[in-house]
Image: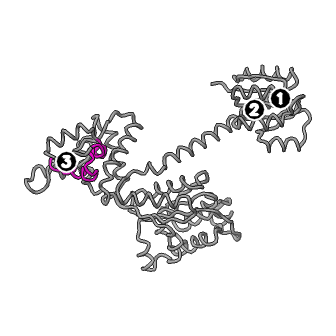
Amino acid sequence: MAVRVLVADDDPVACDLLQEVLAKEGYEVEAVTAGQEALELGKQKPFDVALLDVWMPDLDGLEVLRVLKAFSPDTIVIMMTAFGSIETAIEAIKEGAYDYVSKPFKLEEIKLTISRALERRRLVFENLRFKQELKEKYRFENIVGSSERMLEVYKVVARVAPTKSTVLIQGETGTGKELITRAIHYNSPRADRPFVAIDCSALAESLLESELFGHVKGAFTGAMAAKRGLFEEAHGGTCFLDEVGEINQSMQAKLLRVLQEHEVKRVGGTESVKVDVRVIAATNKDLEKLVADGKFREDLFYRLSVVTISLPPLRERREDIPLLASHFLRKYAAENNRPISHISPEAMALLTEHDWPGNVRELQHVIERAVALTANPVLLPEDLPRKFRRGCEEGASVEGSSLTLRELEKRHIQRVLKQAGGNKKLAAELLGIHRRTLYRLAERYGIDLGGQE
């Protein structure tokens, strides 16, 4: 779609010239010679760019700028005048003009200014869209799980998100600590400000200090220029400290100072820099035990754990596995354009029985792999890694020593029905199958579905 440009200048010659030149650049141009005409045309149709002369007989360009911006805030406005003054230029920019050019203008300058303005607007829109996508991605509803343990997590997240409180998230590797952190950030008043994350276990002490607090030029070998740290980068936003239990006593003291004084001092520097940052920390360690063992400062622990969120491992919320697995199936099937409708009850039973030492992240990778490799329209046991099938294969061959796949599937369906309170519609959704399929499986295994829908 062509870029629409509005030209308003009381000089007909200038109007005709700009219309001709800009049309050759591929723009769709309309020109008028009065301010009121420009506003009437602007109300009839949207314009991407408006070139306005400051001096026009009926309405001056600054008044047109104010009114136009009021009903069309996304229009890029460039002011033109033969009587330039610093006061007029400042007022134009203050009122929302993108730029201010003097007459007699150079046509190349006009073309370049419009081009730069459009590129800037494109970047702004992309940034806004990206931020909106992040907000959508980290909405509370996108954190999957309906178990009692996860419902408690959701409640705490919803309550703490709008506040400034420091949050400590505890949980095993792969339980979704960063997902919860981002959900807090993108549902907080800081959502439009920076979110920066650092893995405290991935860097040596000296590098971690420089990354967090920045450094001055010459602070150490290789410090060729001054560098802002992550706390400064996150000013106004959120700083996520992953695996905070890994930092040593020296770094703990410096981190405590940031939390208490709301300021940082760059490595090698003497001046303190004020920062407004919300800190969310995460760990897979028992910080209270580390405090008791003298390995973690008690005062820092209390500063970090104003609000504590404990994420349960997947093996302790098995009822969420069908929901998560189906969620990841839809995600990766859509991303890879694979027509895979659901996970078979047999495969879902295997997934539910697994202990998932890698938690949600491991489940996610297993489903992603299965979607990438399967040639079936439904995920079957054969699409899962061999370790998932081994127990069932052995169970089928060693009589009485373990459950067969048939018995495993039956028990899985019974367990899901119980979790769903006998609601067949919900049970079918949790199993990732159609309700008619649930009826057939119940008849095959002699499962009483009861009367509840």
Which sits earlier in the primary sequence, circle 2 or circle 1? 1
| 428 part of magenta stretch | yes
Q: Are marks 3 and 2 in contact (CB under 8 Å)?
A: no
Nearer the observer, disc 3 or disc 2?
Answer: 3
Numbered disc 3: secondary structure = helix
Residue on which the image places disc 3: 409
| In this picture, residue 9 sits left or right of residue 332 | right
| Distance in Å between CA atoms under marks 3 and 1 | 75 Å
- Residue marked by disc 2: 112
**Which quarter of the picture shows residue 82?**
top right
Disc 1: which residue: 35
Amino acid type, residue under disc 3 in the picture: Glu
Q: Is residue 222 visible?
A: no
**Mark 2 or mark 1, whichever is nearer to me:** 1
CA–CA distance between discs 3 and 2?
A: 67 Å
| Amino acid under disc 1 | Gly
Magenta residue span: 406-432
